[in-house]
Image (tube, rainbow, N blue to C red):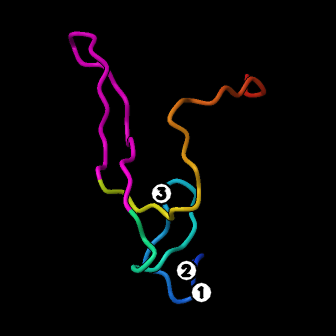
């Protein structure tokens, strides 16, 4: 697979959209792996601090409603 940006061999894929990227074009962004609440009812997240990001896609900060999925 080749890099989305430069068409050279890729070294990984974006965790958010799946685009392939080489080391030169790879960026990092936090990624939530799991959400849960502890025994005290406090909501917490397991986060990968430096997940591979293509720099092209636009991950949303807020959840997106999907009423068609009932």
Q: Residue at x 49, y 62 (%)?
A: 14
Give me the disc on residue 23: none
CA distance for labels 1 and 2: 5 Å
Q: Residue at x 49, y 81 (%)?
A: 10
- Label 2 near label 1: C-beta < 8 Å? yes
Name the residue that disc number 1 marks.
Answer: 7
31 shown above or below 10: above
Secondary structure under tag 2 reads loop
58 shown above or below 44: below
Q: Position of residue 6 (x, y in %)?
A: 57, 84
Image position of 43 (left or right of 8): left
Q: Quadrant of the C terminus?
A: top right
Closer to the camera in the image, 13 or 23 = 23
Q: Magenta stretch? A: 28-49
Closer to the camera in the image, 40 or 56 = 56
Q: Position of residue 53 (x, y in %)?
A: 45, 61
The quarter holding residue 45 reads top left
Name the residue that disc number 2 marks.
Answer: 3
Name the residue that disc number 3 marks.
Answer: 15
Count numbered badges in the picture.
3
Q: Position of residue 34 (x, y in %)?
A: 37, 36
The quarter holding residue 33 reads top left
41 shown above or below 12: above
Image position of 10 (left or right of 2): left
Observer-side mark, 3 or 1, equals: 1
Q: Who comes first in sequence, dot 2 or dot 3?
A: 2
Q: Residue furthest right?
A: 68
């Amino acid at each position: 697979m080749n890099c989305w940006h430069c068409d050279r061999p890729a070294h990984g894929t974006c965790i958010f959209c799946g685009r392939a990227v080489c080391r030169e074009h790879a960026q990092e962004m936090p990624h939530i792996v799991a959400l849960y609440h502890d025994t005290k009812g406090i909501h917490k997240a397991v986060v990968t601090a430096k997940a591979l990001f293509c720099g092209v896609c636009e991950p949303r900060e807020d959840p997106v409603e999907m009423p068609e999925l009932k």
